Image (tube, grey):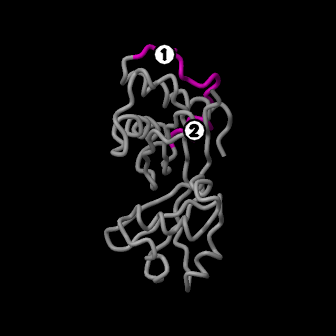
Amino acid sequence: MLNENIKKYLLALARKTIAEKLEIKTEDIVEPESLNDEDSKALEEKCGVFVTLEINGGLRGCIGHIIGTEPLYKGVIENALSAAFEDPRFDPLTRKEFPQIEIEISILSRPRELKYTSPEDLKEKLRVGVDGVVLSKGWAKATYLPQVWETFAGDKEQFLSSLCMKAGLSPDEWMGGELKIETYQAEVIKENL
């Protein structure tokens, strides 16, 4: 669990990073008010991180890494830029849109394989709103963050079918029992604009 100081810092860092790319002046100070050794250690931790951008409650970009390969603060910088300018579902963010974006950062736990014996067992073991899910088969792979459960009103079948399609598989592929399923949890921090 991150303290409020680090949460504010990471959100300010993401916003400043996007603003600089758009050549928009922002406050120069993004340092936490009191960065102690423990805070510094947390920022250096390697963990998965996603940055999500929304405008008026609608998705405007979301990019991240499930497994952390760099310090948390660097992952936030990289994924903030990617979510704003490289998400293939959207045109790059514009200066005009910048004041409207709301930034959300999801810091992920390490994924763990979920063993299951049948489609019913899989549905039983998944925790709505708690588990992010990585679904894979061969080269096909996709993930949904825990907060995506809201989109499906907690319907596990719809969630799994949509995740299969996101991975390029048929929507009922999850019923065959041959998919690798991993779950993770996320600490989500969001701007309150």
- For label 1, the SS is loop
Q: Is residue 10 visible?
A: no
Pointer 1 residue:
26
Q: Is residue 29 magenta?
A: yes
Q: Position of residue 9 (x, y in %)?
A: 57, 29
- Dominant secondary structure of the magenta stretch? loop
> Residue 169 appears in which quarter of the rendering?
bottom left
* Residue 89 visible in the displayed image: yes
Q: Nearer the viewer, residue 181 or 67?
A: 181
Determine the residue positioned at 58% across, 54% down: 151
Depth order, front residue of 9/144? 144
The image shows residue 172 at horizontal and vertical percentages of: 46, 76
C-alpha distance separating marks 1 and 2:
23 Å
Q: Residue at x 61, y 30 (%)?
A: 8
Q: Earlier in the sequence, mark 1 or mark 2?
A: 1
Whole-percent x, y for residue 7 in the image: 61, 35
Q: Is residue 155 above or below residue 178?
A: above
Span highlighted in magenta in the image: 24-44
Tag 1 near tag 2, CB within 8 Å: no
Image quadrant holding the C terminus, namely top right
Specify the farthest residue to the bottom: 117
Q: How many marks?
A: 2
Which quadrant of the view contains residue 168? Answer: bottom left
Q: What residue is pinned by disc 2?
A: 57
Could you tell me the amino acid type at mark 1? Thr
